[in-house]
Image (cartoon, helix red, strand yellow):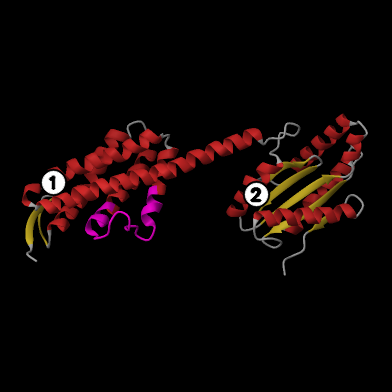
Amino acid sequence: MVHQLHRIGGYTVKVVDDIETIALGVESCLPGVIERWAERRLRELPEGEAGALSRKMGRLVEVFVEFLRSPETVETFSLGGRTRGLVREVATAQYGNGRDAVGVIEDFATLRRVLWESVERELDFSGFGGDVVARFFVKLMQASDWVTHAALEEFDVMVRREMEEAMGRAAATDLLTGLPDRDLFGRLLLPRAVGDNERLSVVVFDLAGLSEVVAAGEVERARDAVRALAETVQRVVPEGAVCARFGDDEISALLPGVGAEEAYGIAENVVARMGGMQVGLQVDAGIAEYPTHAGEPGALLNEALKALNMAKRMGGGGIVAARSRT
């Protein structure tokens, strides 16, 4: 293969083929590409957010250079998943900066235009073979299309997730206590907490005999008792805990970073306070700790409920922690 001399970025360099020449040209003009892209697309953003998104776009161009040098196609080029991960980062930043789907498309279309304009100024394409120029242009278009499509997929996932969570929060809030309901607790809050914490406990409190109070027509007394339990649990649990209305006569508490022993003390405090009130109903509690008693959200909740059922059989005012896994 014949070595050639080319002027790139003000320097004369020796390269082994035309594709490498173009790759070096893209690298040489990268700072200018990102600067011009930012001028066109980031004028409305604060400096810190604009700088973060610009750096991510710069990393995308660096990946494109690797793609240009690679013999792989756009379908097989992944860098071990790093490409998709980077696109996810970019889409997350775009979403966080208020882009809509049209803005996402225009971000990548502008990047492609600026890159092409910059490389065209940097290099004299008349000195390259037609097949080399075609390869560069085709790879640029393929990469741009793939990145845009992948970013829109990630963007759509984030939009739908936020909509679902917002709708869930609006629809799944208990009107009596103002707390999340059982569905929101089990479907969203508990799985998220398990994913974010190495250790946590769930305590489910039950108002013993509440159904009999309702059956006797003392609806307002039952409502007062539920509100009293909810308020008491919220006062006693530590900062960072999450409470929910778990059923007609139950209030649950999610305690990040808290083990079963400490959760037991919290439950004793709640039971004692409720005993001193005029609601006339005893409180039982079931406790389960992650990962000691269960390794995933559904099983953890089941263990807490099993412990609660055992506490109820003790005759009122009982507190039971789940058994450790063997």
From the viewer's perspective, is 280 left or right of 9? right
Quadrant for the C terminus, please.
bottom right
Q: Which residue is drawn at 80% across and 47% down?
A: 205
For the record, the magenta segment spans: 64-87
Front residue (pair 136, 304): 136
Q: Earlier in the sequence, mark 2 or mark 1?
A: 1
Q: Report the mark closest to the observer, 2 or 1.
A: 2
Identify which amino acid the numbered label 1 is placed on.
Answer: Glu
User: x, y percentage for residue 48?
Assistant: 38, 40
> Of helix, strand and loop, which one carries label 1?
helix
From the viewer's perspective, is 198 left or right of 205? left
Residue under label 1, please give it.
Answer: 122
Q: Which residue is drawn at 64% across and 46% down?
A: 187
From the viewer's perspective, is 232 left or right of 166? right
For disc 2, the neighbor class at 10 Å (few under 14, some 14 to 19, many from 20) is: many
Q: Is residue 86 magenta?
A: yes
Rounded to the nearest whole Å, what is the CA distance between mark 2 and mark 1?
55 Å
The label number, if any, that marks residue 11 in the structure image: none
User: x, y percentage for residue 153?
Assistant: 42, 44
Picture quadrant where residue 97 is located:
top left
For the view shown, which residue lies furthest in the bottom direction?
A: 326
User: x, y percentage for residue 257?
Assistant: 66, 54
> Of helix, strand and loop, which one carries label 2?
helix
Q: Is residue 80 magenta?
A: yes
Identify which amino acid the numbered label 2 is placed on.
Answer: Leu
Front residue (pair 46, 320): 320
Viewer can see residue 258: no
Quadrant for the N terminus, please.
bottom left
Count of marks overlaid on the render: 2
Q: Is residue 250 above or below residue 73?
A: above
Residue under label 2, please give it.
Answer: 190
